[in-house]
Image (tube, helix red, strand yellow):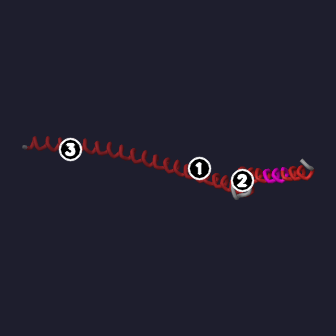
Protein backbone atom coordinates (compact mmCIF):
# COMPACT_ATOMS: atom_id res chain seq x y z
CA UNK A 1 0.00 0.00 0.00
CA UNK A 2 1.45 3.29 -1.02
CA UNK A 3 1.57 6.57 0.72
CA UNK A 4 -1.29 8.03 -1.33
CA UNK A 5 -3.55 5.06 -0.67
CA UNK A 6 -2.80 5.22 3.06
CA UNK A 7 -3.57 8.96 3.09
CA UNK A 8 -6.84 8.40 1.24
CA UNK A 9 -7.75 5.56 3.59
CA UNK A 10 -7.03 7.62 6.72
CA UNK A 11 -8.82 10.65 5.23
CA UNK A 12 -11.84 8.53 4.31
CA UNK A 13 -11.91 7.01 7.82
CA UNK A 14 -11.84 10.48 9.35
CA UNK A 15 -14.67 11.69 7.08
CA UNK A 16 -16.72 8.60 7.92
CA UNK A 17 -15.99 9.10 11.65
CA UNK A 18 -17.15 12.72 11.41
CA UNK A 19 -20.34 11.71 9.59
CA UNK A 20 -21.04 8.93 12.12
CA UNK A 21 -20.34 11.34 14.99
CA UNK A 22 -22.62 13.96 13.50
CA UNK A 23 -25.35 11.34 13.00
CA UNK A 24 -25.01 10.04 16.57
CA UNK A 25 -25.10 13.58 17.95
CA UNK A 26 -28.23 14.32 15.94
CA UNK A 27 -29.83 11.07 17.19
CA UNK A 28 -28.80 11.84 20.79
CA UNK A 29 -30.29 15.34 20.58
CA UNK A 30 -33.56 13.99 19.17
CA UNK A 31 -33.84 11.42 21.96
CA UNK A 32 -33.11 13.90 24.76
CA UNK A 33 -35.22 16.88 23.77
CA UNK A 34 -38.77 17.45 24.93
CA UNK A 35 -39.94 18.26 21.48
CA UNK A 36 -40.08 21.71 19.93
CA UNK A 37 -40.20 23.46 23.33
CA UNK A 38 -37.07 24.87 24.87
CA UNK A 39 -36.32 24.08 28.50
CA UNK A 40 -37.23 27.66 29.52
CA UNK A 41 -40.66 27.20 28.00
CA UNK A 42 -41.09 23.90 29.87
CA UNK A 43 -40.15 25.60 33.14
CA UNK A 44 -42.57 28.46 32.43
CA UNK A 45 -45.39 26.06 31.68
CA UNK A 46 -44.62 24.07 34.81
CA UNK A 47 -44.76 27.24 36.92
CA UNK A 48 -48.09 28.17 35.31
CA UNK A 49 -49.42 24.70 36.06
CA UNK A 50 -48.28 24.95 39.68
CA UNK A 51 -49.95 28.35 40.03
CA UNK A 52 -53.15 26.95 38.52
CA UNK A 53 -52.98 24.03 40.93
CA UNK A 54 -52.59 26.38 43.92
CA UNK A 55 -55.54 28.44 42.70
CA UNK A 56 -57.66 25.31 42.29
CA UNK A 57 -56.70 24.13 45.78
CA UNK A 58 -57.65 27.52 47.25
CA UNK A 59 -60.99 27.42 45.43
CA UNK A 60 -61.59 23.88 46.68
CA UNK A 61 -60.85 24.95 50.26
CA UNK A 62 -63.28 27.87 49.90
CA UNK A 63 -65.97 25.59 48.50
CA UNK A 64 -65.44 23.15 51.36
CA UNK A 65 -65.71 25.98 53.93
CA UNK A 66 -68.94 27.18 52.31
CA UNK A 67 -70.30 23.64 52.26
CA UNK A 68 -69.48 23.16 55.96
CA UNK A 69 -71.12 26.48 56.83
CA UNK A 70 -74.21 25.59 54.82
CA UNK A 71 -74.33 22.17 56.45
CA UNK A 72 -74.10 23.75 59.92
CA UNK A 73 -76.89 26.17 59.10
CA UNK A 74 -79.08 23.39 57.70
CA UNK A 75 -78.45 21.23 60.77
CA UNK A 76 -79.39 24.15 63.04
CA UNK A 77 -82.56 24.75 61.03
CA UNK A 78 -83.38 21.04 61.13
CA UNK A 79 -82.85 20.93 64.90
CA UNK A 80 -85.10 23.98 65.32
CA UNK A 81 -87.75 22.45 63.07
CA UNK A 82 -87.61 19.16 64.96
CA UNK A 83 -87.90 21.01 68.29
CA UNK A 84 -90.88 22.97 66.92
CA UNK A 85 -92.46 19.77 65.66
CA UNK A 86 -91.97 18.14 69.05
CA UNK A 87 -93.58 21.16 70.76
CA UNK A 88 -96.46 21.08 68.27
CA UNK A 89 -97.01 17.37 68.94
CA UNK A 90 -97.01 17.90 72.71
CA UNK A 91 -99.39 20.83 72.35
CA UNK A 92 -101.59 18.81 70.01
CA UNK A 93 -101.63 15.98 72.54
CA UNK A 94 -102.57 18.47 75.27
CA UNK A 95 -105.39 19.85 73.09
CA UNK A 96 -106.55 16.31 72.31
CA UNK A 97 -106.59 15.41 75.99
CA UNK A 98 -108.41 18.63 76.82
CA UNK A 99 -110.95 17.98 74.03
CA UNK A 100 -111.51 14.44 75.34
CA UNK A 101 -112.03 15.83 78.83
CA UNK A 102 -114.57 18.30 77.45
CA UNK A 103 -116.33 15.53 75.51
CA UNK A 104 -116.43 13.36 78.58
CA UNK A 105 -117.84 16.22 80.61
CA UNK A 106 -120.42 16.99 77.90
CA UNK A 107 -121.39 13.32 77.77
CA UNK A 108 -121.63 13.23 81.53
CA UNK A 109 -123.81 16.34 81.53
CA UNK A 110 -126.03 14.86 78.81
CA UNK A 111 -126.32 11.64 80.75
CA UNK A 112 -127.48 13.50 83.90
CA UNK A 113 -130.03 15.63 82.02
CA UNK A 114 -131.60 12.76 80.12
Task: Kindly report the distance in space between the C-alpha atoms of the residues bearing marks 2 and 1.
Answer: 43 Å
Q: Nearer the viewer, residue 13 or 29?
A: 13
- In the image, what residue occupies the spot 33% across and 46% down? 88
Residue at (44% x, 49% y) in the render: 77
- Residue furthest out toward the front: 1
* Mark in the foreground, 3 or 1: 1
Count of labels shown?
3
Picture quadrant where residue 83 is located: top left
What is the magenta segment's predominant secondary structure? Answer: helix
User: Looking at the rendering, which quadrant does residue 97 occupy?
Assistant: top left
Q: Is residue 45 above or below residue 84?
A: below
Query: Residue beneath label 2, please?
Result: 30
Identity of the residue drawn at 55% across and 49% down: 64
Q: Nearer the viewer, mark 2 or mark 1?
A: 2
| Residue 107: percent from left, percent from top | 14, 42
Disc 2 crowd, CA 10 A, few/some/many (<14, 14-19, 20+): few
In the rendered image, residue 67, in percent from the top left (x then y), is placed at 52, 50
Q: Give coordinates of residue 27: x percent, y percent.
A: 73, 51
Label 3 belongs to which residue?
Answer: 102
Q: Residue at x 65, y 52 (%)?
A: 54
Q: Which residues are magenta?
A: 13-20
Q: CA distance from mark 3 to mark 1?
A: 61 Å
Quarter occupied by the C terminus: top left
- For marks 2 and 1 on the same chain, the one whose residue lies earlier in the sequence: 2
Q: Classify 91 as above or below 46.
A: above
Amino acid sequence: MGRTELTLLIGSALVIAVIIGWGLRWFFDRMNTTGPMASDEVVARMREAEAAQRTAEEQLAEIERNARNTESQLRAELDAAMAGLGNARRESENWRQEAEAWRAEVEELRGHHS
